[in-house]
Amino acid sequence: MKTTALIIFVFAISATMSVAQTASGPDIESLAAAERAFAAETVKIGFRDGFIKYFADDGIGFAPQPQRTREELQKSPAPTGPRKVIFNWAPMFGDISQAGDLGYTTGPVLYTAVGENPRPPHHGLYFSVWQKQADGSWKVVVDMGVSVPKAVAPVDTGFTPAIKSGVRKMMAGKVSGPDYLDVDAALTAAIEKNGMAAAYDAFLETEFRVHRNGQMPLTTKDGLHAFFAKEAKAYSYKTIGGKIASSKDLAFTYGSFQFSGSSDIAGYFVHVWRKDSRSRWRLVADIVNELPKNK
């Protein structure tokens, strides 16, 4: 009986630890549900009205420069006539702060042309950071997408929460090291000193995502090293703004970047930073969009 009880106890503890390692619970599920509702509403009523409804007043999008998306869309009249493109998307991965007030999701986007002589579907990969509002609703506070050569997943794909450190909750609220608004500068300094691959190795969380136009998402260090070797460009990041969760364990930054040796703005980035078990900021998401050459 004692042996049986011990086995049951061990399995129970293992199951509890497994649950604790993921961003599970009602908060992450409500975030994923908000993303699905955003997509469904946009399919139904169109891009302009869907984004006005689900973006925060200060929510940032890129067109291609950063702008307050809701404010800019409200300046333009609602379109009349049939839509030419319908795009749909779904959350397949995401994470949330311990306070449950800041989180992100990412997943496949499907652009479908409609009307006469429609073009073949186009595939993308969105990335959105959400913040819980005073009324308890979720709103998008920053959004950046990239194009991909093929679908990363079906638009009816399931949602998988990020893996978390078992001691992360203990570190929530503790502040050490650079402020979250300064970590991009620290990453740039590491790039200048040690190169892209070594710098990213030093800052990346074990579970991470790197999104670049024309590339499938990079989620392993081997894949990222191969990409950096092929690209052979060093970045210099300059933060414009960002937000941090009230639990101080999850934050995002956005800003501009340049290639080394160039004084021109090469494009814009979104970074998501998460505190690890040692209260260090670790990079969990890195999304970059280059400006068109004529910009």
Image (spheres, rainbow, N blue to C red):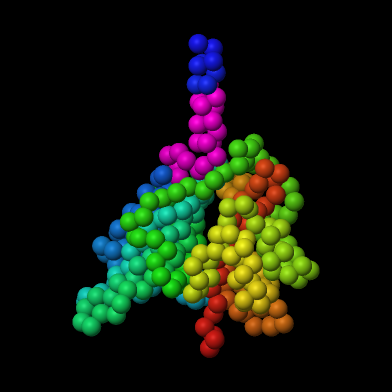
* Looking at the image, residue 173 lies above or below residue 214: above
Q: Name the one closer to the observer, 182 or 262.
A: 262
Range of residues picked out in magenta: 9-28
**In this picture, residue 22 sits left or right of residue 264:** left
What residue is rendered at 53% in x and 88% in y? 294
What residue is rendered at 39% in x and 61% in y? 153
Q: Name the one closer to the observer, 237 or 14.
A: 14
Q: Furthest-right residue in view? A: 193
How many numbered marks have been drawn onto this rendered protein structure? Answer: 0
Q: Is the magenta stretch mostly helix, strand or loop?
A: helix
* Looking at the image, residue 211 lies above or below residue 292: above
- Location of the C terminus by quadrant is bottom right
Q: Name the one closer to the observer, 133 or 37.
A: 37
Please tell me whether residue 115 belongs to the stretch shown in magenta: no
* Looking at the image, residue 162 lies above or below residue 265: above
**In this picture, residue 283 sits left or right of residue 53:** right
| Horizontal and vertical percent position of residue 213 | 50, 73
**In this picture, residue 116 sits left or right of residue 99:** left
**In this picture, residue 102 sits left or right of residue 90:** right
| Horizontal and vertical percent position of residue 270 | 56, 64
Task: Specify whether residue 66 is in view.
Answer: no
| Horizontal and vertical percent position of residue 132 | 47, 48
| Horizontal and vertical percent position of residue 103 | 50, 51
